[in-house]
Image (cartoon, rainbow, N blue to C red):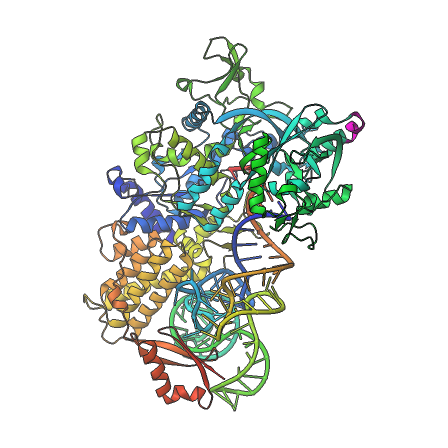
Amino acid sequence: MDYVQVEKKWQKKWQKDKLYSFDKSKVDKKKYVLEMYSYPSGSKLHVGHWYNYGLSDSYARFMRMSGYEVFEPMGFDAFGLPAENYAIKTGIHPEDSTLANIKTMEKQLKAMGAMFDWDYEIKTCMPDYYKWTQWCFLKLYEKGLAYRKQAPVNWCESCQTVLANEQVADGTCERCGSEVIKKNLTQWFFKITDYAERLLTGLDDLDWPSKTKMMQRNWIGKSVGGEITFNIEENGEKFTVFTTRADTLFGCTYVVLAPEHPLTSKITTDSQKKAVEDYIDYAAKASEIDRLSTAREKTGVFTGAYATNPINGRRIPIYVADYVLFSYGTGAVMAVPAHDERDYEFAHKYDLPIERVIGAKGDEDDSLPYVEYGVMVNSEDFTGLTVEDGKEAVLNKLKALGKGDFKVNYRLRDWLISRQRYWGAPIPIVYCDKCGQVPVPESELPVKLPYDIDFTPDGTSPLLKSDEYMNATCPKCGGKAVRDADTMDTFVCSSWYFLRYPDAKNKKEAFDTDWINKMLPVDKYIGGAEHACMHLLYARFFTMALHDMGYIDFDEPFTSLVHQGIIIGPDGYRMSKNRGNVISPDEYIKKYGSDVFRTYLAFGFSYIEGGLWSDDGIKAVHKFLDRVERITGELMKVTTKSDTDVKEIAYTKNYTIKHVTADIENFQFNTAVARLMEYTNALSKYVKAAPDKQTSIDAAKTLALLIAPFAPHFSEELWQGFGEPQSVFNTTYPICDESKLVLDTVEMPLQINGKVKARFFVSSDATKEDIEKFIMETDSLAAHFEGKSVRKVIIVPGKIANIVVG
RNA sequence: GCCGAAGUGGCGGAAUUGGCAGACGCGCUGGAUUCAAAAUCCAGUAUGGGCAACUAUGUGUGGGUUCAAGUCCCACCUUCGGUACCA
């Protein structure tokens, strides 16, 4: 078969027949199968894209043949940093390069022969899309879930630009090598922390990989504890710390503020001023990963100020240290060196008192730092309480004193969405001298991103340089106003795109609520595990917020989730345009066609694991499809038109159906293809050996149907060759006849002391006792332990027999 | 550092979740067919020892639980993903 020609033929025919158009009238049988959309940073798809999209399309085709009306759309995550950087480098406008890339990618995706319904395509950089991204922003704003506050960005003084974390290498600018500093800017945040608890509990009911749920749980990072207020007697200031170990408060011998804590500069004494300021500068250069590293040497300086421990009135010094993060908890901690590793190390270094207040059983023998849960000691009235009771008792006491309370803290932070860049969705807010911050009314959306813009970095947001863009009229008072010059994080665009697809045909309206409620949630979402904590969390947050505002009636976007593995490039890293290690599928497609390539991807890797790219074995898959064509052809010629299969074919056929079906459902495509190879081998053997050729034509047809999800064009061609008038994709996937799988006898291994010594056949319904009796009475089996004393006999019917001898 | 994974023949990868390790395929070796090649077909192929029957060893490393461990527990090593402005 000329695969390349056959594929062209069927792609044309499928398109002409609108075979994959979603039939809205069958929405009650819909399956929304969604692959994470593409980011068009490179101009071309690499083999990793094919791996992701080709195989999830096999799943989608399988679902279609299983009787579902499958909705499988595709689109492009078109805004973002790489296109803008490319523009800065080459002068090519991001819109031009992005749209050109999309065009190439569309062509390649079509050559794949997937079921994508292109009528529903989305591109997030188009006004008809980002109009609704802005709409989402306004809704979150109305609900009080969008607010502005100061936050630091990476700033390169020499390039006069904000840098992404990716552009900072070892604290220096990737472009010019000069030192990167932190600069505070007023930026927009989404209040995802309001949803922390629901994002956490909602995970329980999702059919997601357990590792992904685990990562999200840890990312949200719930901890139960309390807040404790410390006063600074000298100046009447006070601050609060969060702790999960209120029971150790008696052992608190100093407190630490994050360098960014606003109180730091207020309380520092004159003599310490220089040291503290230098330290704050030093800390601003460290990355968060470094600061959190427990292996890094702890540093800090004394502020000169003292606070009062609220439980015992003791005067304790206040330090500044960068192992305390301003973004977590309250940005201040109570230090208990005797019972915390980091505090212990710090206290040792700066010669601060270390005082035990917990002991294993109330004694004091164990070494410090003692971080286990024990019993309180040296804690006045509380001495003798267990840690658990102590936590509660201490907090209750503080609560009564007005110095503390119970509190749940989350590691999750609010989502900073402002970007000081051009290539993103504009933020629909204007600032008016009279009215202040005013949202753009819905009727004026979209706030269009201007095309003519100077996006070279020179210290200001590119949009600031466009008077045409910046000058606006205040929607409230009609006076002069300026627009927000920032754009939104691209994760905002991807937090709701799955809601847009069902409406994407209609370029004017989104949120046809009834329709979206019928089409969502997504039944199967497929994409990389690298999105576990960000995209997948943001999408859940958006869905919950829109649900609470009454726009949609579900509050989780993705019922079931699968991660495909990563295809590693020749240099050992995941393929990406950035790294320049991509392998193009185009040559393979030209040579072998899409079907061979797709089937190879299915067979050569474990889908969930991924692996190092190699094309070893692609020829073998080519041979395999040739073999399928030859053998089905022979079977069609020589078999009598019987309705039943001979026994061995009936068994193999149904065994294959059963396993292939289960494997595809579980995204275990490699074993599914392996089973198809076994079936093909069995048929081949049969055709050659059987004198009577009595098996049914159905045995051949079954093979063509089973293989259809992997090699769609090939299968369609075979199907037509069988004289079938319908498309193979309007045919039902074979169903296993379990009655053909029942065997009279089973083979079992006999182990002596765990080593296999013999095998034997018994009736498949034999009991433990039957089998034991059989072994003892069969001389050839009993010979293996003759003369030795049998200590134990373990028999698991159908699986194993193990005789333990002395 | 922290969070989450992974490690099985020369290679890609299987193993019904505690029950025969290495399915399926690549590669390699030998054979059939052929003037020859391609293609196709047949047989073999974890490692060491042995002509062989057989035997010992073997799932990153070191311990442990169990009649039985790739699978469970403890401690490590290596690689990968994420670490909040790559997406």
Placement of A230 over or under B11, stated as above or below: above
Of residues A433 and A491, the one drawn nearer to the viewer in this rendering: A433
Placement of A237 over or under A197, stated as above or below: above
Placement of A605 over or under B56, stated as above or below: above
Q: Residue furthest left?
A: A642
Placement of A715 over or under A633, stated as above or below: above
Considering the whole magenta stretch, tell me its main secondary structure. Answer: helix
Left or right: residue A360 versus residue A15 is right
Quadrant containing the N terminus of chain A in the rendered view: bottom left
Highlighted range, magenta: A270-275
Q: Residue furthest bottom?
A: A787
Q: Residue at x 64, y 39 (%)?
A: A288
Residue A272 included in the magenta stretch of the image = yes
- Place of residue A448 in the rendered image (x, y in percent of width and height, measured from the top left): 47, 22
- Place of residue A263 in the rendered image (x, y in percent of width and height, measured from the top left): 67, 27
- Place of residue A240 in the rendered image (x, y in percent of width and height, measured from the top left): 62, 31
Q: Quadrant of residue A737?
A: bottom left
Residue A65 included in the magenta stretch of the image = no
Q: Residue furthest front?
A: A381
Of residues A96 and A546, the one drawn nearer to the viewer in this rendering: A546
Camera sees residue A476:
yes
- Place of residue A396 in the rendered image (x, y in percent of width and height, measured from the top left): 56, 36
Of residues A702 and A234, the one drawn nearer to the viewer in this rendering: A234
- The number of callouts visible is 0
Q: Residue at x 32, y 29 (%)?
A: A512
Left or right: residue A612 versus residue A640 is right
Camera sees residue A291:
no
